[in-house]
Image: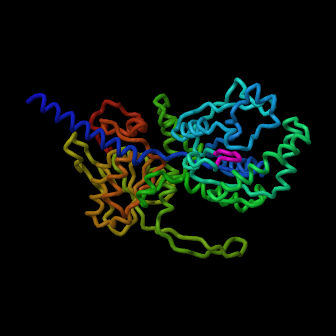
Amino acid sequence: MINCEAGSANSASDNQNKSKSILTQEVSTKQPFIIGVAGGTASGKTTVCNMIISQLRDQRVVLFNQDSFYHPLTDEQFKKVHEYNFDHPDAFDVELLLSCTETLKNGRAVSIPNYDYKRHRNVESSRMVNPSDVIILEGILVLHDHRVRDLMSMKIFVDTDSDLRLARRVQRDTVDRGRDIQYVLDQYAKFVKPSFEEFILPSKKYADIIIPRGADNHVAIDLIVQHIFTKLGQHNLCQIFTNLFVIQSTNQIRGMHTLVRDAKTTNHDFVFYADRLIRLVVEHGLGHLPFTEKQVTTPTGSIYTGVVFNKRLCGVSVVRSGESMENALRACCKGIKIGKILIHGAGNNGRHLIYEKLPADIASRQVLLLDPVLASGNSAIKAISLLLTKGVPESNIIFLNLIAAPEGIHAVCKKFPRLKIVTSEIDSSLNEDSCVIPGMGEFGDRYFGTDNDNSLLRQVSR
């Protein structure tokens, strides 16, 4: 009997862990955006890649080349190098290319071979490549193998005139790689041109985007970059919940998150960088308010067509962490009214409303609900439910926070599909104590510099 009960308990625990695993898989952090850039020899693929990278500015981008995955030639092959077809799919180690790309896609660093074009072998020192937001794989045959294509978020084919490509190849191979011009022309006629027609050109049909004229096509490259920016701003959960908005991540934002999450950061620095992040979230949230167009006359006597936002606003902070966001809101909205809600977490008994002080006319206002951390969503649901009982339309509520756990997003968005959630970053999950992981600790204690052992304050506003 005891064993049966233990088995049931273990089974329940296993089911709970399995459900949590499924949830984690469903709402895992956003995958890197992988771009494959193919095209004939000397078509301008590298130039296109560099133009894309330059326009992505402070996004984390890594570029690696299919040429790094050439099979090293044996001594016998090297003696007959003029008979070796470097443009054939068999010239590449596709399995290693797949392994390296999948490793980067899964967020782990990988060692990329360093290929010597003169000796046709890998040099001893390999290149360590770190995972990034954008991964660009460039090469003549990156769209040939379906397994490599399946890893890509975007497939590009650079389409350049064959005569121009030949002229570029001659210059590149004679100047950069020290080859004889007759050798280059013989290789082109014997291997390069036939392989292009048999393997490379047919892969063009798999491309999502074809760029005529290569790097000279600035319009196409601009459109590609805009599409990448759009996709980078979307967490997987944003595709599930249309009322969830994550501000676009930049190195500045990641740097501030690094500081506020570091347990060694001083209280002064934590407050400084938390305030900067809060200001960004508040300003992004204000952009979701309803507005009307308005024309004004500028000091030059010209007419400017702009917008005017709804002035009937109020903030509501979930005490006490939410109070850290009030100064940023006041700085953006002069004279704004701010209400308070205090919710006490009582172990496994849910959340209890302890105190509320809200504007009497809150039902007629747009409400900005303030709480820097969305964890399980229990406190948020309690606060939002209170606002609804006060007559606030669900669509008039914008919930602002710095970080959010997938579990809390699911809970709030499913229950209140018409409100908006604006956050600066979505974390991985919750631990057994309902703390956000990786999180930033007890936000209120770190922001206000209070004792972490104050159990009452630690249970408020989670």
Question: Residue 307, how many percent across, how many down?
Answer: 56, 70
Residue 222 sits in quarter = bottom right
Query: Measuring 29% from the left and 54% from the top, which residue is drawn there?
Result: 381
Query: Measuring 32% from the left and 52% from the top, which residue is drawn there?
Result: 411
Residue 215, visible in the rendered structure:
yes
**Image quadrant containing the N terminus:** top left
The answer to whether 26 appears left or right of 117 in the picture is left
The answer to whether 103 appears left or right of 396 in the picture is right
Q: Give the range drawn in magenta.
A: 136-142
Query: Measuring 87% from the left and 50% from the top, which residue is drawn there?
Result: 167
Question: Residue 252, how many percent across, how many down?
Answer: 59, 43
Say if 306 sits above or below 344 in the image: below
Say if 48 sits above or below 393 in the image: above
The answer to whether 17 appears left or right of 31 in the picture is left
Residue 323, visible in the rendered structure:
no
Q: How many marks?
A: 0
Residue 74 sits in quarter = top right
Residue situated in front as seen by the camera: 414 or 145: 145
**Image quadrant containing the C terminus:** top left
View extreme (top): residue: 124
View extreme (left): residue: 1
The answer to whether 291 appears left or right of 405 in the picture is right
Residue situated in front as seen by the camera: 352 or 407: 407
Question: Residue 23, how many percent across, how many down?
Answer: 35, 46
Question: Residue 416, how many percent across, how many down?
Answer: 33, 60
Residue situated in front as seen by the camera: 130 or 294: 130
Query: Measuring 60% from the left and 47% from the top, which residue is drawn there?
Result: 145
Residue situated in front as seen by the camera: 18 or 76: 76
Does the segment drawn in magenta span residue 216?
no
Say if 329 sits above or below 15 in the image: below
- Colour mode? rainbow
